[in-house]
Image (spheres, helix red, strand yellow):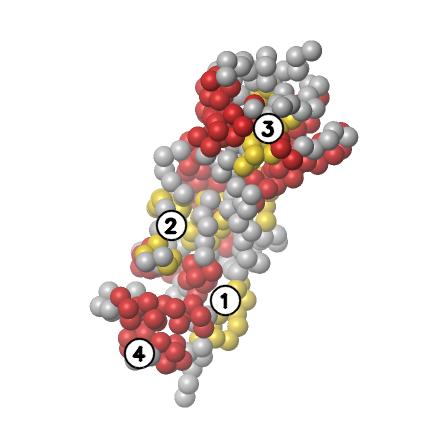
Amino acid sequence: MVRTGSVRTGNGGVAAGPTLAVVAREAGVSVPTASKVVNGREDVAPETRRRVTEALDRLGYVRRPRFDAAKASGLVDLVVHSLDSSWSGAVLHGVEAAAHDAGLEVVVSAGLNRTRAGRPERGWLDKLTARGSSGVLFNLAELTSSQYGWLDQHRIPYVLIDPVLEPPPGVVSVGAANWQGGVTATEHLLGLGHERIAVVAGHQRKMCSSARVAGYRSALVAAGVRQRPEYLRQAGFDEGLARLRMLELLDLPEPPTAVFVCSDHMALGVYEALAERGLKVPDDISVVGFDDLPEARWAAPALTTVRQPLSEMAATALRLLVRMMDGDRPESTRTELSTRLVERASTGAPRG
């Protein structure tokens, strides 16, 4: 008798899928060889592994789930983009505090999106199932469809913290009210009398950046202020690129009198560009950031910024994960925490 596998979508829902025999036939290998690849065995030739992996992805094969909530450990994984930033420190602080309250231990990993021969690396996920983690939190991770499937096939609960891209339907995530934050930052500058307001954005394709820019535009429209296409500059959340984009703005025939920068790190690059041109903040130009990282307080002058509650977002995600580990599904897959403006010394009325 031929058995079928199953394909899960999002964090739930099951559909019929191909058997391992079908995958093996598609890849031109034996069923035992295909099984070795599926189970992460190392004794398979690279070319054979590539063919089987491509067949698995192409056919949507998913192994039978291994996760058993009744046997789950008190261990959860936190995957962050990197460990060398104050952003990650704030997220880790929130997760640790909530995990302590829940009686859980946390394993922290960085850099999930490494690739081998240009393909997603699934070895980390195999290690996750091997150590028996009860759930996973992903912060700023760009998961591939293969990686989503890898998690879903084992029925391991997971929550995304501030996802970079729009997650698939059914995936639970926690973020900040980025659109409202963009509105708030721009309204603050408008209220001070600025009309020539530029924006230094992150990545156009990233959820948080596009939402912040949309909020900026909405505030200008509501105030009846003309939007200037040349005032929008993309800097990819990179401090050095933000410096270059600010220099470009200053070279315009009519440069801005204020700038909304979509991250505090990029705002430091903007500060550098202004210093190079001998301009003072906020006497010559006002600057508003986004995040309220410690760097915002340390900057000179201290940076007015939109605070997003990173530690609270992380703690909320951990609490949602605990509910999912207990078999409970959140009523909503998207949770947004409010942002607020933190006024410091980098903004003031325009000259004249």
Label 3 environment density (alpha carbons within 10 Å; few <14, some 14–19, many ≥20)? many
The residue tagged with tag 3: helix, strand or loop? strand
> Dot 3 corresponds to which residue?
260
Q: Which numbered disc flags the more N-terminal residue, 4 or 2?
A: 4
Depth check, front residue: 338 or 330: 338
Depth check, front residue: 6 or 67: 6
Q: Amino acid at mark 4?
A: Val
> Dot 2 corresponds to which residue?
112
> Dot 4 corresponds to which residue?
29
Q: Which numbered disc flags the more N-terminal residue, 4 or 3?
A: 4
Distance Cα–Cα, label 2 vs label 3: 31 Å
Q: Amino acid at mark 3?
A: Phe
Q: Which numbered disc flags the more N-terminal residue, 1 or 3?
A: 1
Q: Which numbered disc flags the more N-terminal residue, 1 or 2?
A: 1
Label 4 environment density (alpha carbons within 10 Å; few <14, some 14–19, many ≥20)? some
> Residue 95's quadrant in the figure?
top left
351 to 232, vertically: above or below: above
Distance Cα–Cα, label 4 vs label 2: 29 Å
Q: Position of residue 122 (x, y in %)?
A: 35, 59
Distance Cα–Cα, label 4 vs label 3: 56 Å
Question: What residue is drawn where x is 45% and y is 57%?
Answer: 144
Distance Cα–Cα, label 1 vs label 2: 21 Å
Q: Position of residue 269 (x, y in %)?
A: 47, 26
Question: What residue is drawn where x is 42% and y is 51%?
Answer: 136
Q: Are marks 1 and 3 in contact (CB under 8 Å)?
A: no
> Dot 1 corresponds to which residue?
8
Q: Amino acid at mark 1?
A: Arg
- The residue mark sitting in front, 4 or 1, is 4
Q: Position of residue 209 (x, y in %)?
A: 56, 40
Depth check, front residue: 150 or 146: 146
The residue tagged with tag 1: helix, strand or loop? strand
